[in-house]
Image (tube, helix red, strand yellow):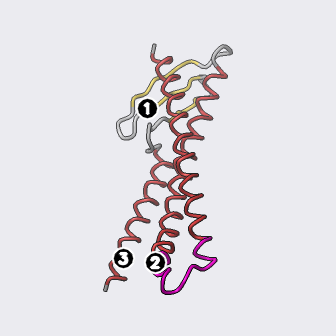
Amino acid sequence: MKSKRSFWFTAGGYSIIILLITLAVTLNVYPGGYGYIYDENAQQLTLERGMFVKEAVTVEVNDDNTLRYLLFQDEVNRAIQSWVLSLTLGIFAVYLLQRVIPAFQKRKEEGVKVKDILHAVLLIVSVVMMIMLLISLSGSIQYMEQVFTTAVN
């Protein structure tokens, strides 16, 4: 009975993470929630901020500020990628954690196997990578906030 309960908790957790990934890619629902819409005909860029309630600012793209707004678009894409990759690594970390904890609990009876050490090392690497991606996401959000604030003023 406990394994069925564990299965449904794990399946529910994975479903939530997959839903968060889908929302991030399709609706820009990620920390910060920055997005952009570029209109080639009018040479205008609409900058968006907010996860669920979007605040938008439309700016003219001319030769003076083209680079700034191209970098903004790049940072939005990088932030979404960082968020999706950190969530994907979260799924991988949960999978590895399900392997490491039972191996750690049974180490006195069965000993430590090479695959258990490999799982533990991969878990540590995935957690470190998640932290690095979230730090990168934080830097992207700071830059996008600066550009958005400059566009508002």
**Residue 76 vertical placement versus 64 (above, below):** below
Q: Please provide percent x and percent y for residue 150.
A: 50, 17
Q: Nearer the viewer, residue 100 or 126?
A: 100
Residue, disc 3 = 6
Residue 105 highlighted magenta (yes or no):
yes
Q: Position of residue 103 (x, y in %)?
A: 50, 78
Of mark 3 and mark 2, the one earlier in the sequence is 3
Evaluate if marks 3 and 2 touch, with contact meaning CB atoms under 8 Å apart. Answer: no
| Res. 7 image quadrant | bottom left
Measured Cα–Cα span from mark 3 to mark 1: 38 Å
**Residue, disc 1:** 49
Q: Nearer the viewer, mark 1 or mark 2?
A: 2
Secondary structure under the numbered disc 3 in the rendered image: helix
Quadrant (top left/top right/bottom left/bottom right) for the C terminus: top left
- Residue 74 to residue 120: above or below: above
Tell me the magenta residue range.
Answer: 102-118
Q: Amino acid at mark 2?
A: Pro
Query: Residue 84, image x and y in percent?
Result: 53, 51
- Magenta-span inclusion, residue 39: no
- Real-space CA distance between mark 3 and mark 2, rounded to the nearest whole angstrom: 13 Å
67 relative to 55 in the view: left or right: right
**Which image quadrant: the N terminus?**
bottom left
Question: How many other residues sit within 10 Å of disc 1, few (<14), some (14-19) or many (≥20)?
Answer: some
Nearer to me, 123 or 60: 123
Q: Which residue is mark 2?
A: 102
Residue sitting at x 47%, y 81%: 106
User: Which disc, if any, is residue 148?
Assistant: none
